[in-house]
Image (cartoon, rainbow, N blue to C red):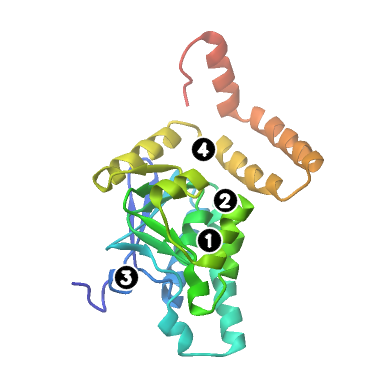
Amino acid sequence: MLTIDDPLLLRERDVRGVVTLTLNRPQAFNALSEAMLDALQTELDLLAADDGVRVLVIGASGKAFCAGHDLKEMRAEPALDYYERLFAQCARMMLSIQRLPVPVVAKVQGVATAAGCQLVAMCDLAVAASGARFAVSGVNLGLFCSTPSVALSRNLPRKLAFEMLVTGDFIDAVEARARGLVNRVVPADELEAEVERLCASICAKPRTPIALGKQLFYRQLETGIAAAYDDAGKTMACNMMDASALEGVQAFIDKRKPDW
């Protein structure tokens, strides 16, 4: 049983630079309290400045992945300026995930609702246990999930995202994969191994091109196609001047494995 002294966020790091952050409020379904948002932001800021990090995995303890915002905390202070600060704080944390120069993988073992579903959508990749379920269910409480809709609408086709937002209905992991919210679905006892396979595949590649590529990937999505091609071309040119690309191309020509 957790006590008041247990950390809200657990942190592990392996020798490759794969960092795992585990939401650790199982008794509150890992709700994103202000303190949890602060803890996540602190870790993301540290990781952004750490060139040794290769992959970030975000997981959770207990039965739920994340139930969204802490509704009891929100209801205790019904003031417009408080809510604006809270949602700005959450948006900053979510954007920090996208701006992190390494891939971020959501390891979803249970229910992800509202801002918890948003958290899954903001991660670059997601692996879910077959029993996981997803919803943006604020509308059931009279609160349209406006901020989660930003992430959801950038993952799912428009009509499928809107249907989730206006019905608040749950979808299962297989449907989440079909709609584009998660990449892989496996039995619960294989979740850890599947995330490890994904991390190993990423770690086998050089860090610099992945960092350049991630930044470009999200940047070009928000621009017109001509500007996107211009940006992408310049990014690829910079990438080609990096030692990892020069070695990789030469290794292909020499018919050998690259020495990264």
Which is nearer the N-term, disc 1 or disc 2?
Answer: 2
Amino acid of disc 4: Arg
The relative height of residue 18 versus residue 235 in the rendered view (above or below) is below
- Which residue in the structure is indicated by mark 2? 156
Q: Secondary structure at mark 4?
A: helix
Which is nearer the N-term, disc 2 or disc 3?
Answer: 3
Closest to the observer, 44 or 26? 26
- Which residue in the structure is indicated by mark 1? 164
Residue at (47, 12) in percent of width and height:
256
- Which residue in the structure is indicated by mark 4? 207
Are the residues at dot 1 and dot 2 in contact (C-beta closer than 8 Å)? yes
Q: Secondary structure at mark 2?
A: loop
Which is nearer the N-term, disc 4 or disc 1?
Answer: 1
Q: Secondary structure at mark 3?
A: loop
Closest to the observer, 160 or 48? 160
Are the residues at dot 2 and dot 3 in contact (C-beta closer than 8 Å)? no
Q: Which mark is residue 25?
A: 3
The CA span between labels 4 and 1 is 36 Å
Which quadrant, please, contains the N terminus?
bottom left
On the rendered structure, is 193 left or right of 151?
A: left
Are the residues at dot 4 and dot 1 in contact (C-beta closer than 8 Å)? no
